[in-house]
Amino acid sequence: MKKDYYNILGVDKKAPKDEIKKAFRTLAHKYHPDKKTGDDAKFKEINEAYSVLSDDAKRSQYDQFGSAGPAGGFNSSSGFDGFDFSQFTQGGGFNGGQSFEFDFGDIFGDVFGGGGRRAQTKRGRDVSIDIELSFEDSVFGVERTVLLNKVSKCDNCGGNGAEKGSELTNCSTCNGKGSVREVKKTFFGQFESVVTCNVCLGTGKIPKVKCHICRGQGIYKKETEIKVKIPAGIDNGEMIRLSGGGEAVAGGTTGDLYIKIYVKKHALFKKDGANLVMDLGVKLSLALLGGEQNVSTLDGDIKLQIPEGVTHGEILRIKGRGIPQSKSARGDILVKINILLPKKLSREARKTIEDLKKEGI
Ligand SMILES: [Zn+2]
Ligand SMILES: [Zn+2]
């Protein structure tokens, strides 16, 4: 009853693994049931032999006891029924056979490499660019026009590849279906799959007269002007995605355009959420007496009322001159008071201060 697995694969008892693998491939090729030379029983036998001899543990058990199982020998009803070829479906891949030390990728890679082509829609390349903004533009938002040299949809034909006034007809290659059956001859026989028609690129239609600009491609590389609306309040390092602003692809969807924003620093202002923050130097006399001081804002100069006795580090608020949050709402400017003390006093000033000192100030 004992089957001689070495004999079945036609290898020596001391044959190394790669030799066993090679022998298995050659025989599996020959006896696959889909082949003319195929033989179902023999194919199963080859699989069985290989499943044992390719597994170190099973092989040594087989060598020792003449069987790879604990008792009763190893036959095709004891857990091994050959490869389940029903699993080899387009796009599905092969997920069985974990018990085999056998690289399916090797053999099937070229056959099934195109798996899922039918379901995939082609997508154009994403494009990314940088835009540098002035601080003011980042606060109020701006519209920028950028010139991109990229593959775009043809304006002349609107992307269908037909010359103006010319109509589209059914693709004769795929009979208007957009897909064709593809038969690949392989190792284990023929495999059939449905792939996108490469004449009409899946649309099922071809132009009667090709567009003279894109030569019927529907796309071509050109300089394209893109208007980008940059929203108010954008921050340094933020990214804007313009869906469909990337490269076009024939018979697929256009990629996206990614715009990375760089904001130049402002000499006076820093952003803090919706607010702008600034330091304001105030003379000691003004701080003591109070009064008006000119302050520049992003909307022009204004007069800021400095309250009498303002303290160093105190924050004054200029309402509604910060970063726009909506059409009606804006943040504020927070003015941090920095009281400027004179480094040197004139003789007169010193005398005056000494008088203040006497007064207890
Ligand atoms: Zn065109
Ligand atoms: Zn076609």
Image (cartoon, rainbow, N blue to C red):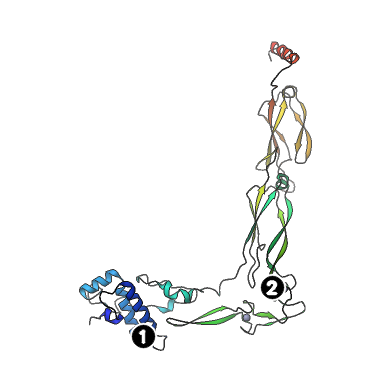
Task: Using the rendered image of the protein, determine whether residue 339 is visible from the camera's viewpoint.
Answer: yes
Point out residue 265 in the picture as x, y percentages from the top left corner.
68, 42
State the quadrant of the C terminus: top right
In the picture of the structure, the residue carrying the numbered disc 2 is: 218
For label 1, being within 8 Å of ligand 2 is answered: no
Instruction: Determine whether 260 is above or below 347 in the image.
Output: below
Instruction: Give the image quadrant in which the ligand numbered 2 is located.
Output: bottom right
Q: Helix or strand or loop: what does disc 2 sit on? A: loop
Relative to the observer, which residue lies in front, 344 or 337?
Answer: 344
Q: Residues within 10 Å of mark 1 (few under 14, many from 20)?
A: few
Q: Are marks 1 and 2 in contact (CB under 8 Å)?
A: no
Q: Residue 280 in the image: x percent, y percent? A: 71, 31
Q: Is mark 2 within 8 Å of ligand 1?
A: yes
Quarter of the rendering containing residue 147:
bottom right
Q: Position of residue 13 (x, y in %)?
A: 25, 76
Rendered residue at 64%/62% (across/down): 256
Residue 52: image quadrant is bottom left
Percent across and percent down for residue 181 are 55, 82
- Residue at 25% across / 71% down in the picture? 60
Q: Residue at x 38, y 84 (%)?
A: 30
Q: Which residue is mark 1?
A: 40
Look at label 2 and name its amino acid: Gly
Q: Classify 265 as above or below 252.
A: above
